[in-house]
Amino acid sequence: MDPRDIILKPVLTENSYDDINDKKYTFVVNPKANKTQIKSAVEEIFGVKVNKVNTLNQIGKIKRQGYHSGRRTGVKKAFVTLTKDSKSIEFFDSLAQ
């Protein structure tokens, strides 16, 4: 799989902004990707050293439309922690202020 098919988009929330100073970044990733694929994709795309990857499968909310009910699509999030001597990701530098 291509690294750009694994990392889909960054997650930009208040909690993820707080973690940027600790070199922890959050991404929405391909649901079929595993931790080693996510680690190699982040290292290849951003040119950094990854220390740890934690993943979370978030189930979609149940929504109703009259009598019928269904689920929104779920997402898989990856919480990536960089090593202490690694440079930060430039995309998030302007957001961490």
Image (spheres, rainbow, N blue to C red):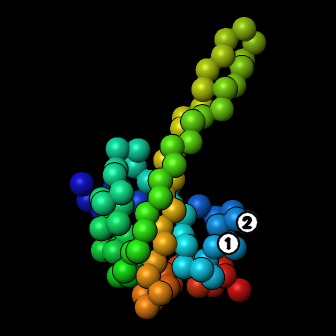
- Which residue was labeled with disc 1? 17
What residue appears at the point 30 percent right and 68 percent down from the top-left corner?
40
Extreme residue toward the top, this view: 67
Is residue 87 rendered to the left or right of residue 34?
right
What residue appears at the point 55 percent right and 73 percent down from the top-left corner?
24
- Which image quadrant for residue 61? top right
Instruction: State how many labels appear.
Output: 2
Of the pair 70 and 57, the residue shown nearer to us: 57
Secondary structure of residue under mark 2 = helix
The quadrant of the picture occupied by the N terminus is: bottom left
Q: Where residue 9 sits in the image (x, y, percent)?
A: 50, 60
- Which residue was labeled with disc 2? 14
What residue appears at the point 42 percent right and 87 percent down from the top-left corner?
86
Residue type highlighted by circle 1: Tyr
Q: Where residue 92 sits in the image (x, y, percent)?
A: 57, 78
Real-space Cα distance between discs 1 and 2?
A: 5 Å
Dots 1 and 2: beta carbons under 8 Å?
A: yes
- Which image quadrant for residue 37? bottom left
Number of other residues with Cα within 10 Å of mark 2, as a class: few under 14, some 14 to 19, many 20 or more: few
